[in-house]
């Protein structure tokens, strides 16, 4: 009889530290900070890998950690449908369930529900929707979403908000932003305060500066532990996103973390850091990894392209990840052509390493008051295009 | 600029040792041995994980090694079609291509071609077949198969043989066995002898003792470096397979390794070891791992069964693998219900650990002249069925 101590069981559920954000230094608007939570500290700016269904797809968690992840994100919508938040609660929360021993943020479920189209109906009290899995009907209110995230034992809980598409009229954006503000208040009231746990409000208002300003200022009155910027990267383009960020972060509290939801490509992240954003999440590194798209210091590489068939060079000569240290492009190309799972594993690992390595360099650059140089060099290299074929 | 030394490039292509099999001891008919090759030593009895397309599906090679693998198998048929043996030759062989630093065996391509049905035509000179990928036409003769395996740089090359289905008439089995004998001779003639590399002949003859005897004795005259037993585990059932093994191994050379192709379930392997077999390969541990079937000390477990939804116990309390040490059945169940890649990864890893752990215990038992006790205890436990639901 072997005494088994699960990796899952090594996950701490006890809390010691208060939820607290320390602004360490800045380089113009770019900020270096530290977020202290019940489940560990997070150096900001940080990128949060997405673990939709309580797993960062095609990756072992030890490799997620090795890549530099300090916090991951899980999706309330997906988990409430499968395996169900009651099941996860019985298992001790998402972190214990999946064996993740660091902080975890859950979204509110709102974003996925908004993208269900005809399958959902938004009303003042909340949103009714049908599961994409089996069509069964659900209702999500600010309180229900908050309660579910509590059951999931999320280190960081997000308010329920409405995320409208781009473009939206001023009137529609105004109506929706005010609904989200109302939901913010009700989400905050439903939040169960626990030492080291936090809840974020979400600034909305599409691309309209006065709406963003209003939303940011009203949310501050509710007094969240951090603030997200929602409703961006929904088709408005990088230029308009950056402009909206300029018009938003300036009205956000300085001593609270700022989280730009669902962003983005490497150059989006760098531009947002420059505008004072501290936290990011995006499916891109893992999703692209599963479709054969690699992020490299010289831009994106489609490993399925036949130019790689006999290419004995690594994906990225500047990368220290397991994939780049051990496999050449020819082998990765073969794995994708043969639809082998190892291809998805190796490329997801590389991409996450690239993203989190970039965040580390961003933090270094801010610390050294060298962010503008870093940005210029990164972008020059990133936009230069892939190495020439052999 | 980073100097990259690929894991792939650490693979040895040089040879130092002669290909050599040492019979260390025996416990009745069960044999403990050591196979010495250009690419490393192999303790027998051994199980060879299958790496069909130059990857052991859904596994990192470091985990294949950790599980105890000393040699893996790749499929000539799949590799000649994709990426093509010429490509692999340019990449330095399969081992270098995939970064496998130990011995590798390739089959002849015959078995896969035989299962193509209408897509193939067997004649005296060889077999014409159409690719299952794009329908393009190929011809495989004993010499071509041997040359391809040479291009793949296989440590162990298999002769081209014909593998007929069960049941087969005596006449059909006799004709086919003699064709395979002819192909054996021509395969041997085509084999390029290199220090530490070997080639195996394949005993055929369906379930007919006199045909097996004839095949075994004629192959010995050709003088291969080892001998396989083909044409079993094709539907004849365990009892008839064991009986045929009894009637075959007795006519095989004692000082050469004996390899039972495509076998099998854990109890098949134990029964074959008892009858003097040294080497095995099978897709079962990895393929079952991808369909939610786990091998445990108490038999097979279907992790997709809803009884596991809230089960906080490991797959197998007696298992020391990464999966069983870190994750419970509830989480594995969730991963399979949500069709998450991590589920395939964790179960493949567990199953391979189970198989290779069993082989290690088998070797220990033979060494300690305790094989019959081991067999009895293993089978009693294995047939006892899964633990009761919580």
Image (cartoon, coloured by chain):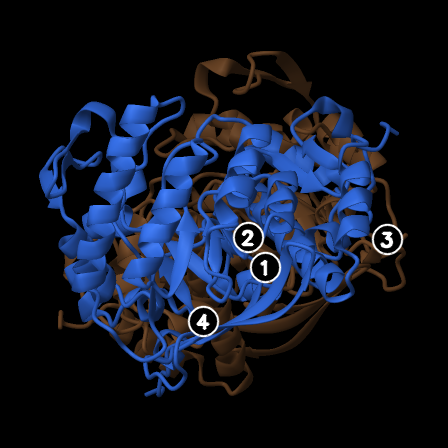
Chain colours: A blue, B brown
Q: Residue at x 86, y 46 (%)?
A: B193
- Disc 3: which chain? B
Query: Would residue B320 appear left or right of B199 to someone viewing this image?
Result: left
Residue at (25% x, 74% y) in the render? A193
Report how far apart the C-alphas of labels 4 and 2 lie in the structure: 21 Å
Report x, y in % for residue B198.
76, 51
Which residue is nearer to you in this view: A40 or A132? A40
Q: Which is in the foreground here, disc 1 or disc 2?
A: 2
Q: Is residue B87 visible?
A: yes
Give the residue number, with chain letter if any, for mark 1: A45
Which disc number belongs to residue A277?
2
Mark 4 / mark 2, whichever is N-terminal: 4
Q: Are marks 1 and 2 in contact (CB under 8 Å)?
A: yes
* Whether label 1 touches label 3, CB < 8 Å: no
Q: Are marks 3 and 4 in contact (CB under 8 Å)?
A: no
Residue A240 at what x, y percent from top left? 54, 29
Mark 3 residue element: loop
């Amino acid at each position: 009889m072997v005494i088994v101590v699960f990796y899952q069981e090594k996950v701490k559920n006890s809390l010691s530290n208060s939820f607290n954000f320390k602004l360490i230094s800045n380089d113009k608007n770019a900020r270096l900070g530290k977020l202290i939570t019940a489940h560990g500290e997070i150096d900001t700016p940080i990128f949060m890998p997405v673990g939709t269904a309580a797993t960062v797809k095609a990756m072992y968690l030890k490799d997620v950690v090795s890549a530099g992840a300090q916090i991951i994100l899980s999706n309330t919508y997906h988990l409430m449908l499968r395996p169900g938040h009651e099941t996860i609660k019985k298992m001790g929360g998402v972190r214990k369930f999946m064996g993740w021993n660091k902080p975890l943020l859950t979204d509110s479920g709102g974003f996925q529900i908004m993208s269900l189209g005809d399958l959902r109906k938004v009303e003042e009290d909340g949103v009714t929707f049908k599961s994409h899995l089996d069509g069964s009907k659900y209702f999500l209110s600010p309180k229900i979403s908050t309660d579910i995230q509590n059951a999931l034992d999320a280190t960081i809980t997000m308010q329920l908000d409405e995320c409208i598409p781009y473009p939206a009229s001023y009137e529609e954006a105004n109506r929706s932003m005010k609904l989200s503000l109302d939901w913010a208040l009700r989400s905050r009231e439903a939040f169960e305060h626990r030492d080291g746990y936090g809840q974020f409000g979400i600034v909305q208002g599409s691309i309209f500066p006065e709406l963003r300003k209003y939303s940011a200022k009203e949310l501050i009155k509710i007094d969240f532990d951090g603030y997200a910027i929602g409703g961006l990267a929904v088709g408005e383009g990088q230029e308009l996103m950056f402009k909206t960020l300029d018009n938003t972060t300036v009205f956000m509290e300085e001593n609270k973390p700022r989280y730009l939801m669902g962003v983005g490509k490497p150059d989006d992240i760098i531009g947002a850091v420059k505008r004072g954003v501290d936290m990011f999440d995006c499916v891109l590194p893992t999703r692209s990894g599963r479709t054969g798209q690699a992020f490299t210091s010289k831009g994106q590489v489609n490993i399925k392209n036949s130019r790689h068939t006999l290419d004995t060079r690594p994906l990225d000569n500047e990368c220290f990840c397991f994939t780049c240290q051990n496999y050449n492009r020819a082998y990765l190309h073969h794995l994708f052509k043969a639809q082998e799972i190892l291809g998805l594993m190796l490329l997801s690992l590389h991409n996450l390493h690239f993203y989190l390595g970039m965040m580390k360099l961003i933090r270094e650059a801010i610390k050294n008051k060298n962010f503008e140089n870093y940005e210029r060099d990164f972008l020059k290299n990133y936009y230069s295009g892939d190495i020439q074929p052999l």
